[in-house]
Amino acid sequence: MRNGTELREDIMAAARAEFAQYGLAGARIDRIARMSHASKERLYAHFADKNGLFRAVVAADTAEFFRSIPLRPEAIADFVGDIYDLALRQPELIRMNNWARLEGIALDEPLTEGEPALGQAIEAIETAQATGYADPAWPPLDLLIVLFGIGLAWAHSPDPRAATGDPDIIARRRATAVEAANRVVRSQYQR
């Protein structure tokens, strides 16, 4: 018999798969309940409605994303490589955020250990700028968004060749993303 926490995790896992495939509008609560081996009543006991469930899954995934790849001031370009790797390993995370944007859902800022995740990343960039690891001319939030764009470029590419399992191509693309990030973040005096 599952406890409440286990049931909630099973519901969220089923919801993640459903929402990643169909988005909020196309997802069906009955399929989520069936996949999680939970009644619809139990599902609604944990989540008020489908929108609340979607938001809970996106919030959990985004928080996990930031926990799994923290931005370190001395290794900003490596952060971009980590973003690339995560998008490759867990494309459903990217799809969930894309669905949220397509559905026009304003998401709350993700938290890691109770603190705003974006705030932590911005602080890391500010530290990198103060210690000479990043060009201080960049507004920190702008730089963070550009770094995400570089790391997710292949995940968002319209090129049909973007999807590949070839390890040599994957390694080359990752190296390109990291080098592009290095060029973006380096101070003028470091070039």
Image (cartoon, grey):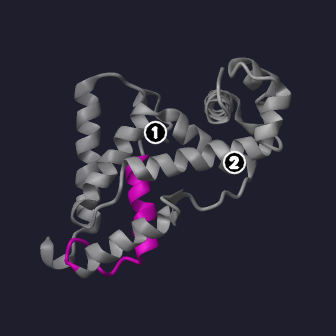
x 43%, y 46%: residue: 152
x, y percent for residue 142: 45, 70
Pick whichever, 85 or 68, lies toward us: 68
Q: Residue 96: x percent and y percent? A: 61, 40
Amino acid at pointer 2: Arg
Q: Which label was assigned to residue 21?
A: none
Q: Residue at x 48, y 46 (%)?
A: 64
Residue at x-position 23% and y-position 44%: 175
- Circle 1 residues within 10 Å: few <14, some 14–19, many ≥20: some
113 lies left or right of 181? right
3D distance between C-alphas at marks 1 and 2: 22 Å
Say which element carries label 1: loop
Can you identify the residue that label 2 sits on?
55
Q: Nearer the viewer, residue 129 or 36?
A: 36
Q: Residues within 10 Å of mark 2 (few under 14, many from 20)?
A: some
Q: Is residue 77 left or right of residue 22?
A: left
Tag nearer the camera, 1 or 2: 2
Q: In terms of image quadrants, where is residue 130? A: bottom left
**In the image, which residues are magenta?**
131-152
Picture quarter with the N terminus: top right
Mark toward the start of the polypeptide (1 vs 2): 2
Numbered mark located on residue 155 in the image: 1
Say which element carries label 2: helix
**Quadrant where the C terminus lies?**
bottom left
Q: Residue furthest right?
A: 41
Q: Quadrant of residue 189?
A: bottom left
How far across and how far down the image is residue 147, in percent? 38, 59
Asked if residue 160 is positioned above or below residue 78 in the image, the reply reads above
